């Protein structure tokens, strides 16, 4: 077996998921070089089986032990590929690079674009999976290409953004979760970008910091300050960020709900005039869940969207609570909530 692969048996996953849920994986391969993937996936235990790719475990709910073999890519190289004649610089990062470290590295290189996405936990390899987004920016705007290994064919693909089928917290990688292993991502980043400051509280934060001429680095600092204040730190209180996606509903339903609930935030849903996006946090808060606790499974005090593990909750207990939250929103507003993280070991 290649020296680039380390195989662990009965690997504990508690430290490898930000909910801090106790679970085991019968087989876990740490892969330091993606070139070793074909050899690994030809081995007994891995051959022909669906895999669970694991990055930082910040967008997963593990319900029980993981049946499928787990693969974690650990190479962490970042390279500036072209300073092309065009405005954009192409930066290539391995799947194992920490997302936040990449953001800070690109800003230090004088490149703009990723500043609103600072402090999102996890890895570069997972960023395209749900097209991570925050403060009015989605990563798809800056994805130049995604390198992905396809176990079924043994081919290494280079997908352009169109082939990634990015949507709101969605992509081809999320929809066909067994098809690709993302090995690296290339980003096209401008030297001078348009700052996106319209999202809730960002301008106020910059003003409070005494910044009247914001730079990308200043915006990242403001985003970091807001996130540190608002979101529970998984190292202290287990969570996976927002547990539910903002539901996208027909405009007629959104209008009817807004007429009855004037404070319900309603947003555009991309470019589709027939659809609207509703605030899942508002719907959950209106059903009285903020701060609720069933044993060690709970909803954060300050954030109705954040499901939390107060210590010893199992994945099943967290899932049960999430289902009750969704059922109450369905019963009161007629709106179906969907989880944002991948639920492993159970169907939603
Ligand atoms: C406090 C907190 C705040 C958060 N805030 C945000 C936010 O603002 N915006 C946002 O979009 N998300 C947010 N998240 C969710 C999460 O951080 C992101 O989705 C992140 O991209 C997950 O990265 P990860 O490496 O931890 O992925 P994991 O949780 O390990 O995996 C997530 C999914 O991606 C798959 N995957 C991972 N790596 C690969 C790979 N190399 N190839 C193929 N599939 C792969 C996994 O199988 C799984 O389906 C937050 C989470 C937390 C805990």
Image: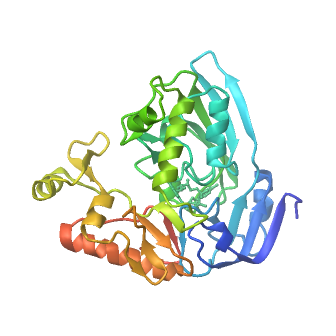
**Residue drawn where x is 79% and y is 51% of the image:** 35
Name the side, left or right, on which 29 lies relative to 170.
Answer: right
Q: Position of residue 40 (x, y in %)?
A: 78, 64
Q: Which of 36 and 57 is in front in this view?
A: 57
- Image point 32% across, 42% down: which residue? 270
Q: Nearer the viewer, residue 304 or 156?
A: 304
Note whether 128 is above or below 208 in the view shown.
below
Horizontal and vertical percent for residue 165? 46, 46
- In the image, is 299 to the left or to the right of 17? left
Q: Find residue 207 and report its horizontal and vertical position in percent.
A: 42, 32
Examine the rendering and report whether any part of residue 164 can be seen: no
Residue positioned most to the top: 85
Q: Based on the displayed image, in which of its 4 quarters is residue 301 positioned?
A: bottom left
Residue pictured at 32% horizontal, 72% vertical: 289
- Residue 323 appears in the rendering: yes
Q: Which residue is rendered at x = 76% and y = 52% of the image? A: 34
Closest to the observer, 321 or 127: 321
Q: Ligand 1 sits in which quadrant?
A: bottom right
Q: Position of residue 20 (x, y in %)?
A: 60, 72
Q: In which quarter of the image is residue 327?
A: bottom left
Q: Is residue 275 left or right of residue 322?
A: left
Quick one: quadrant of the N terminus?
bottom right
Q: Is 17 situated above or below 138?
A: below
Outermost bottom residue: 295
Instruction: Indicate the quadrant containing the C terminus: top left, top right, bottom left or bottom right.
Output: bottom left
């Amino acid at each position: 077996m290649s020296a680039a692969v380390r195989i662990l048996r009965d690997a504990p996953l508690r430290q490898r998921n930000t909910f801090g849920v106790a679970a085991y994986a019968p087989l876990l391969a740490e892969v330091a070089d993606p070139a070793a993937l074909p050899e690994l996936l030809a081995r007994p235990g891995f051959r022909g089986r669906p895999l669970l790719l694991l990055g930082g475990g910040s967008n997963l709910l593990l319900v029980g032990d993981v049946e499928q073999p787990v693969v974690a890519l650990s190479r962490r190289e970042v390279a500036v590929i072209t300073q092309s004649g065009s405005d954009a610089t192409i930066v290539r990062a391995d799947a194992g690079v920490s997302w936040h470290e990449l953001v800070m590295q690109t800003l230090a290189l004088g490149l703009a674009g990723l500043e609103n996405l600072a402090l999102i936990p996890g890895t570069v390899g997972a960023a395209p999976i749900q097209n991570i987004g925050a403060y009015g920016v989605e990563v798809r705007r800056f994805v130049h290409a995604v390198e992905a290994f396809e176990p079924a064919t043994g081919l290494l693909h280079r997908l352009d953004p169109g082939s990634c089928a990015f949507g709101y917290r969605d992509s081809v990688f999320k929809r066909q979760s067994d098809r690709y292993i993302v090995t690296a991502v290339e980003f096209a980043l401008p030297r001078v970008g348009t700052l996106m400051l319209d999202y809730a509280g960002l301008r106020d934060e910059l003003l409070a910091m005494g910044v009247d001429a914001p730079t990308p680095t200043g915006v990242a600092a403001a985003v970091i300050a807001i996130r540190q204040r608002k979101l529970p730190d998984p190292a202290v209180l287990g969570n996976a960020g927002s547990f539910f996606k903002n539901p996208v509903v027909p405009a007629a339903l959104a209008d009817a709900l807004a007429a009855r609930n004037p404070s319900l935030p309603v947003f555009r849903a991309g470019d589709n005039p027939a659809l609207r996006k509703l605030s899942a946090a508002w719907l959950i808060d209106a059903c009285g869940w903020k701060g609720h606790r069933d044993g060690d499974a709970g909803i954060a005090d300050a954030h109705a969207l954040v499901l939390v593990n107060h210590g010893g909750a199992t994945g099943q207990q967290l899932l049960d609570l999430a289902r009750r939250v969704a059922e109450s929103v369905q019963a009161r507003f007629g709106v179906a909530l969907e989880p944002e993280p991948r639920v492993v070991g159970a169907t939603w």
